[in-house]
Amino acid sequence: MKKSRGTSLALTSDYKQFVTDLKSRIASARLSAGRHVNRELVLLYWDIGQGIVERQKTLGWGESVVELVATDLKHAFPDMQGFSPQNVWRMRQLFLDHSSDEFLSQAVRELPKSNKHQFLRQPVADSPSDAGNRKSEVLSQAVRELVAAVPWGHHANALAKLTAPAARLWYLRATASFGWSRNVLLNQIKAGAYERAVTEKKTHNFDLALPEHFAEQAEEMLKSSYNLEFLGLQRAVRERELEDRLISRLQAFLLELGYGFCFVGRQHRLVLGKKEYFIDLLFYHRFLKALVAFELKLGPFEPEFAGKMDFYLNLLNDTERAPSDQPSIGIILCAEKDDVEVEYALRTKANPIGVAAYTLQSKLPGELKGRLPTAKQLADIVRLEMEGGR
């Protein structure tokens, strides 16, 4: 009889919701515990590396101390992983990489922009020398905490390979902010995300349409250009086929977009009165807490694209945006763009819109040179497809 009651209880909606909530809470607790363990592990490795470096400077210890420390720690803690000579060398390098004058100078310029490091603006002592020491200590602590926010495997297998302090700081902040996995981080480095971020201008109106703190996060999410070489296109395609290719290679596309994007759907239907409209690709960004709509254009950017996206975002905000969500964001992906034209097109738009170009091939194969249609011809194909498909 008890078994029967238990079985019937398991079928009720209240019980199912109760178990769903428990699963979510357990998953959250496991994630939080994992992050705490990771933070403490990285801080431990930082302290080990710092201790070795400082004693090498003050006591004149040679490089052999690294091997000796590794042997002694492994003997004292045989059940713990991570005390191989190679890993202890990495601990030493971790401290050196993030305590060098060049890296700290870069951090002075970059970290105060982040809301996660408010303590950088704490008051300091009255004495100039004390003030300088205090600022140096606070900066070092800020860097240490930022480093601890990124898993050790990311440091050892990806970030350690970066030689430029500015690039290391950029990937460090991005990983900490968006929770990039190791594979995502490696993919971003391989794709030159930092180089694209600092050398190519991003075109958007986020600073006008969003609160300052959210505009900064949205700006970090947007890329100036997107590399779609993974589609393997060897001929001209129509807009819908480009969309089909992206969906079939969704995992690769998500890696190119960056961590945090969750796919909602393609040709997402919006209704206004008796009319219906369709967004090419719709995503939800877990960290921004916002819907992100993508429109794909085979031709160059046209000002009317911005008006259409602004219209879509108004509909999204009124019909599908959750009460706790941030304003929806629109991204127009096109074959090419004129930054001045984009700036004028976005100036009067109330919704946050970004415009980015994409590349299908970094180098055009010889057999295709002179055989692909022009941007105007591609744009005409898009218009015909749109007229015939909807």
Image: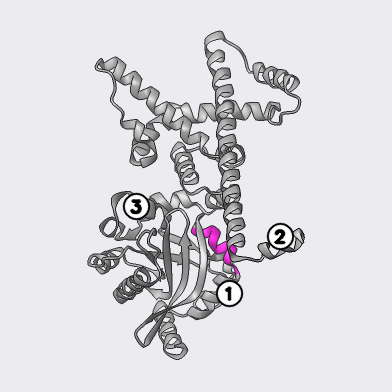
Q: Which residue is mark 1?
A: 234
Where in the figure is residue 291, as x and y percent of width and height? 42, 64
Which is closer to the viewer, label 1 or label 2? 2
Residue count near mark 2 (Cα–Cα under 10 Å), binned few <14, some 14–19, many ≥20: few
Please report contact status of discs 1 and 2: CB closer than 8 Å, yes or no. no
Which is closer to the viewer, label 2 or label 3? 2
Which residue is at a point 48% across and 52% down the rendered structure image? 193
Which residue is at a point 56% across and 36% down the rendered structure image? 36
Q: Secondary structure at mark 3?
A: helix
Judge whether residue 212 can be spotted in this image.
yes
Residue count near mark 1 (Cα–Cα under 10 Å), binned few <14, some 14–19, many ≥20: few
Q: Quadrant of residue 388?
A: bottom left
Q: Which residue is mark 2?
A: 6
Looking at marks 1 and 3 on the same chain, the residue that comes earlier in the sequence is marked by 3
Q: Residue furthest top?
A: 59
Cα distance, mark 1 to mark 2? 60 Å
Amino acid on which the number 2 mark rests in the picture: Gly
User: Of helix, strand and loop, which mostly describes the magenta segment?
Assistant: helix
Please state the extent of the stretch shown in magenta in the rendering: 249-257
The foreground one among 287 and 368 is 287
The C terminus sits in image quarter: bottom left
Residue 214: mark in rendering: 3
